[in-house]
Amino acid sequence: MVDQAIKNKTPVFIMGNIDELELLWETLPQQMVMDVFTRPITVGDMVDNVCTQMNDFYQLKKHTILAVDDSGIILRKIKALLEDTYQVVLANSGAMAIKYLTLNTPDLILLDYAMPIVDGSQIMQMLREDPEFHHIPIIFLTGKNDAETVKNVMSLKPDGYLLKSMDPQKLHAAIDDFFASRGK
């Protein structure tokens, strides 16, 4: 059982008396142990602690998506659609997105093409030219599907192009497929 936990990098909670805990400490890599419960313990306290820590653990394992769109309605829809599977961060302008990126690195940027002041193509060009950000995948999520816009967007070589009008489940599936194709 210990070998399986190590192999799968499963978070472990250990419980026991002092002698049992010493034996487990010799067997398990300490970074795997999320918490230690020394007997006697109350079940309620243990359950609360385990639930809190596991929730935090799985939040950290979620892919982070930065959604950039000037429409608050669209941003809220994206968050509602994806937040069960992904950690979704919202930015309602290119400036806000850049500010977020100076301190954080998302796993994916969903970027609107048509925005005021700085549009999606300008944001993408800035990110691709900066060595600190050029590796972050960008998928355009836009309402524009006319031939000229599609041609312009695809010339930027984004990691994908999705339409806001897509069925929400297909949009979610497309993002799932994106991460699956990258083995993440």
Image: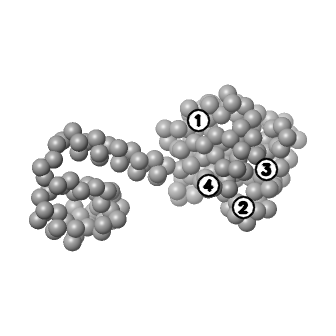
Residue 60 on image: x %, y %: 47, 51
Figure quadrant of residue 96: top right
Residue at the outermost top position: 73
Q: Is residue 148 above or below residue 138?
A: above
Task: First in sequence, mark 1 or 4: give its number.
Answer: 1
In contact (CB < 8 Å): disc 4 and disc 3: no
In contact (CB < 8 Å): disc 1 and disc 4: no
Answer yes or no: is residue 154 visible: no
The disc placed on residue 79 is: 1
Q: Amino acid at mark 2?
A: His
Q: Amino acid at mark 1?
A: Lys
> What residue is shown with label 3?
123
Q: Secondary structure at mark 3?
A: helix
Q: Is residue 36 above or below residue 19?
A: above
> What residue is shown with label 2?
134
Residue occupying the point 45% across, 47% down: 59
**Residue count near mark 3 (Cα–Cα under 10 Å), binned few <14, some 14–19, many ≥20:** some
Residue 50 on image: x %, y %: 29, 46
Q: Secondary structure at mark 2?
A: loop
Residue occupying the point 67% across, 27% down: 73
* Mark 1 and mark 4: Cα distance apart in space: 18 Å
